[in-house]
Image: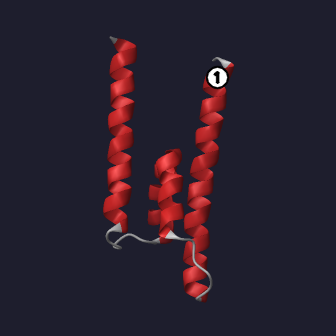
Amino acid sequence: MSEAILAGLAALLLINGASAALFALDKRQARLRGSRVPERTLLLAALLGGSPGAYWARGRFRHKTRKQPFSARLHAIALAQLALLGALAWWWLR
């Protein structure tokens, strides 16, 4: 495996871990009635590649699962990423 691919996978692992950690922090702060992580920050982490981590954390911590329009925006980000991934796979395999 090339160094570029390994670096990309490492970056994805880091952003997904950071995304999950942000959801965990926000849930903790919600319980403690402390300073919350802005939804914009949670969505930005998902947009930067952390949507799998965001979805995992939503289920694990039962956090922001019914909140609208947050959920719709997270779904839109994930769908756009899947479409991009599909387009890249199609381009690579043709």
Taking the image as drawn, is residue 91 in sight? yes
Taking the image as drawn, is residue 52 in sight? no
Residue 8, picture quadrant:
top right
Identify residue for label 1.
4
**41 or 51, nearer to the observer:** 41
Residue 22, picture quadrant:
bottom right
Report how many numbered discs are placed on residues in the image. Answer: 1
Coloration of the structure image: secondary structure
Q: Height in image: 81 above or below 75?
A: above
Position of the N terminus, as image quadrant, is: top right
Spot the residue most to the front. 40
| Label 1 secondary element | helix
Residue at (32%, 71%) from the top-left corner?
A: 68
For residue 23, side relative to residue 94 (left or right): right
Q: Height in image: 12 above or below 3?
A: below
What percent of the width, then of the height, locates residue 62? 45, 72
Q: Height in image: 56 above or below 69?
A: above
What percent of the width, then of the height, locates residue 32? 61, 87
Residue at (33%, 55%) from the top-left corner?
A: 75
For residue 36, side relative to residue 55 (left or right): right
Residue at (32%, 45%) from the top-left corner?
A: 79
What percent of the width, then of the height, locates residue 31? 56, 85
Spot the residue most to the top. 94
Residue 21, picture quadrant:
bottom right
The amino acid type found where label 1 is placed reads Ala
What percent of the width, then of the height, locates residue 30? 55, 82
How crowded pointer 1 is (Cα within 10 Å; few <14, some 14-19, many 20+) is rated as: few
Position of the C terminus, as image quadrant, is: top left
